[in-house]
Amino acid sequence: MDRQSQIDRAHAFRDMHDRNSILLLPNAWDAGSARLFAQRGFAAVATTSGGVAWSLGCADGEQAPVAEVVAAIARITRVVDVPVTADIEAGYGDTPAAVGETVRAVIEAGAVGVNLEDGRHDGLRDCAEAAERIAGARAAATAAGVPIVINARVDCWITPAADETVRFADAVRRARAYLAAGADCIYPIGLGDPAVLAALVKTIDAPVNVGARPGMPGLAELARIGVARVSTATRFAAIALGAVDQAAQAMRASGGFDSLAPSLSHADVQKLFVHG
């Protein structure tokens, strides 16, 4: 992809966050899943860090070598004609400059957006430190000339908190600091309570991403309360592995092969790649 085409996709992706409509964003884990999502009419595709890591033979949590992750992103951007945003976890680096290097690499791989989280294995990063890492990501994008969308993950709802009021206040403080540092969208991962979600959307007045899962309100209700973007995280990758697991166990248990009837035939999958 030439740089101007990438810039055009970045602007198109940015326009999808104008909050006039809700963006439904499926998370791919390889070129095949990305191609499938694009062919089924999704306006943009995200990657899932967990799914990509699993496809590379690694656990989630920055366990996959960053070079292999970037190569996987490049394969995905090569086979789709829609904007691709990459989940780069905590940025694969100890410093803001190192995070910027990761962002530069995924931009070179064709991405026009990134997810960047503020959690660590031992809890949340200091807010100022997390904001500096977002600033490093934005500086790298500016230097590359590609106006990527930075989706700043706020991990308050997946870390222990003694008081929900304190948790909410910390999330708002972090969201505002991240937006000031160059983020475009806020992702309160783990937050599923519609009332709290609506309060957060109203308080920060910025595009908010939520992670889809069973039991959550549907798109119409999420749009009503002001959510701008819904992503699927590892759900589709886990569904795919689960389907294979069920078929494999049925084959072993029965000695028969009826479980090997796919909903997509070989010819169907081939058709996804006829033009690329």
Image (cartoon, rainbow, N blue to C red):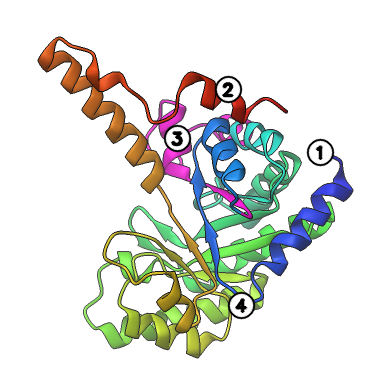
Q: How many marks?
A: 4
- Mark 3 highlights which residue? 53
Disc 2 vs disc 3: which is toward the camera? 2
Cα gap from disc 4 to disc 1, whole angstroms: 28 Å
Extent of the magenta region: 43-71
Q: Position of residue 235 (x, y in %)?
A: 37, 48
Is residue 14 one of those drawn in magenta? no
Circle 2 Cα neighbour tier, 10 Å, few/some/many (<14 / 14–19 / ≥20): few
N-terminal of the two: label 2 or label 3? 3
First in sequence, mark 4 or 3: give its number.
Answer: 4
Residue on which disc 4 sits? 19
From mark 3 to mark 1, how far is it between C-alphas?
A: 24 Å
The quarter of the picture where the N terminus appears is top right
Give the mark, 4 or 1, whose residue is nearer the N terminus.
1
Which element type, helix, strand or loop, lies under badge 1?
A: loop
Q: Earlier in the sequence, mark 4 or mark 2?
A: 4
Compared across the picture, whether 251 is left or right of 118 comes to left
In the drawing, what numbered circle is on residue 1? 1
Q: Nearer the viewer, mark 4 or mark 1?
A: 4
